[in-house]
Amino acid sequence: MAAFLGVCSILIYIKYYTEDHNTAVYHLGYVASGFSIAVYGSPLVSVANVIRYKSTEFMTFSMCLATFVVCVLWTIYGYQANDNFILVPNGIGVVLGSLQLFLFLLYPKTSQKTITYGRASRLGKPV
């Protein structure tokens, strides 16, 4: 409900309270860029758990890879179209996607707790 009210508020502002079409496009571009950056950075919410447990089991590799590839493609398009509202948020998305993929190189998929727990249960020892 909050998202719906937020989007409606933005659309009402753009439709009725901006001076001209160019100003409306300019303001809407900033709002869309902010939302794009938030979406691209959302998997980074789990970075604290990734670093704490030294494991990427809290992140989805396919989503991080797809986000990175899409951001690269849109960044190229934004550069060719000379459109900063496409170029800047997707360029930031490339950086955030690179960080996410780097975490997959740095840390394994399973945590040390899971490995220790699995090994102890196979040996028949209580945990």
Image (tube, grey):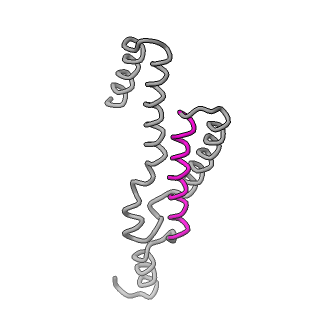
- 79 horizontally vs 35: left or right: right
Kindly identify the residue that appears in the image at 48 percent across and 28 percent down.
Answer: 29
In the foreground, 124 or 66: 66
Picture coordinates of residue 95 (x, y %)?
53, 52
Kindly identify the residue that appears in the image at 35 percent across and 21 percent down.
Answer: 9
Kindly identify the residue that appears in the image at 53 percent across and 33 percent down.
Answer: 85
Height in image: 33 above or below 52?
A: above
| 98 is within the stretch colored magenta | yes
Q: Which residues are magenta?
A: 85-106
Q: Quadrant of the N terminus?
A: top left
Height in image: 34 above or below 109?
A: above
Residue that sits furthest to the front in the current view: 82
What is the count of numbered marks? 0
Picture coordinates of residue 37 (x, y %)?
46, 42
Kindly identify the residue that appears in the image at 55 percent across and 60 percent down.
Answer: 101
Tell me which secondary structure the magenta stretch mostly adopts. Answer: helix
Height in image: 64 above or below 55?
A: above
- 18 horizontally vs 29: left or right: left
Picture coordinates of residue 87 (x, y %)?
57, 39
Q: Quadrant of the C terminus?
A: bottom left
In the foreground, 32 or 30: 30
Picture coordinates of residue 97 (x, y %)?
53, 53
Height in image: 52 above or below 41?
A: below
Tell me which corner region of the image, top left, top right, bottom left or bottom right, holds residue 65.
bottom right
In the foreground, 97 or 24: 24
Tell me which corner region of the image, top left, top right, bottom left or bottom right, holds residue 49.
bottom left
- 80 horizontally vs 112: left or right: right
